[in-house]
Amino acid sequence: MEKIVIAVDAAGGDYAPAAPVAGCLEALSRHQDIDLVLYGNEAAIRAELAGKEYDADRISVVDCTEQIAMAEPPVAAIRKKKDSSIVKGMMSVRRGEAHAFISSGSTGAVLAGGHLLVGRLKGIERPPLGVLMPTEKGTSLLIDCGANVDARPSWLVQFAEMGSIYYGTTFGKENPTVAIVNIGAEEEKGNALVKETFPLLKANENINFIGSIEARDIPAGMADVIVCDAFVGNVILKEYEGVASMLLKMVKKSLMSDLRSKAGALLIKPALKRALKDFDISEYGGAPLLGLKGLVVKAHGNASAREFGNAIDQCRDFYGKDINGKIAARLCRDDKETK
């Protein structure tokens, strides 16, 4: 049985090393075909592992004496802090020692490391972050959600192609629908970027482009792959998460408001838990940085053990279905050059 090796940053994020370690143990209990390498303060990681039941042969720890803080300039930190968990973990992917790397640390450092250390596939102009989001009809992919704030039309076209491959392969859906975020459904609407990109997407035979999508239609699942620049995508993502959190608090408050509501809450609790679980973005893992020579996944800064475990599941699925190979075969043609 081929083992999938996944490197995990156990130093970055709000709840390190407890959350990444616990998530690793959860994932190990589910899958026999993965080995995990944890990067960070070895003493702290070993303390979290102490007393837990797990196969010690399937987890290794690499000590890191440096840490990249959230506020540090990303590129400078990547170049300077060679003994940090992000740099060491990504270098293991670059050298082929690991098939994927997961981090909830500095987003800027993860993005910079993806470019500088792992490297882009030939022909890919800019790697985007793609996040899976719950919708009324199931799941949609929002791409880009944080990597390229100022984008070009040709980049968005590649985002659409990579997103279609990722979504279609992950969910077994042939020809998934693709839409571009806009302020209206009419083709002539939008800012300069959208207006320039729209005809390029429309003419692209590799995707199933259905036109524009307004933000209010995203939760309804009107498109499988939703394309935008990272500024727009990150606003959508944060609003999505904020509304979900607000609704959860309002529902809990209403159900606990009086004795009758509390009694009703007991009856609907199982169904409510299922619905809320489906609407939890962390259930889908992290956001892969598509278009790199290896897999890098960015988890939320406040990622829980469950999100880390789901991100490991995500990496296992991504590698097993050879999504990177499919992206390379589609977009990395000889007539293209990395810019």
Image (cartoon, rainbow, N blue to C red):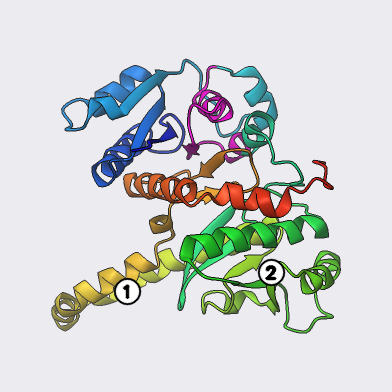
Q: Is residue 219 above or below residue 88?
A: below
Q: Is residue 72 above or below residue 216?
A: above
Please say whether residue 242 is one of the residues in the magenta stretch.
no
Q: Which mark is residue 251?
A: 1
Q: Quadrant of residue 188?
A: bottom right
Q: Which mark is residue 83?
A: none
The residue drawn where x is 32% and y is 17% is 43
**Mark 2 belongs to which amino acid?**
Ile
x, y (%) of residue 202?
Answer: 78, 74
- Inspect this view and state whether residue 128 appears: no
The residue drawn where x is 71% and y is 58% is 229
Badge 1 element: helix
x, y (%) of residue 46?
Answer: 28, 22
x, y (%) of residue 255?
Answer: 24, 76
Q: Nearer the viewer, residue 80 or 6?
A: 6
Q: Is residue 190 left or right of residue 85?
A: right
Please report whichever mark, 2 or 1, sits nearer to the chain's N-terminal start.
2
Q: Quadrant of residue 108?
A: top right
Quadrant where the image shows the C terminus? top right
Question: Foreground mark, 2 or 1?
Answer: 2
Residue under numbered circle 2 = 207
The stretch of residues the image draws in magenta is 83-110
Asked if the residue at tag 1 contacts the one at tag 2, i.e. Cβ–Cβ closer than 8 Å, the answer is: no
The residue drawn where x is 64% and y is 41% is 292
Please say whether residue 86 is one of the residues in the magenta stretch.
yes
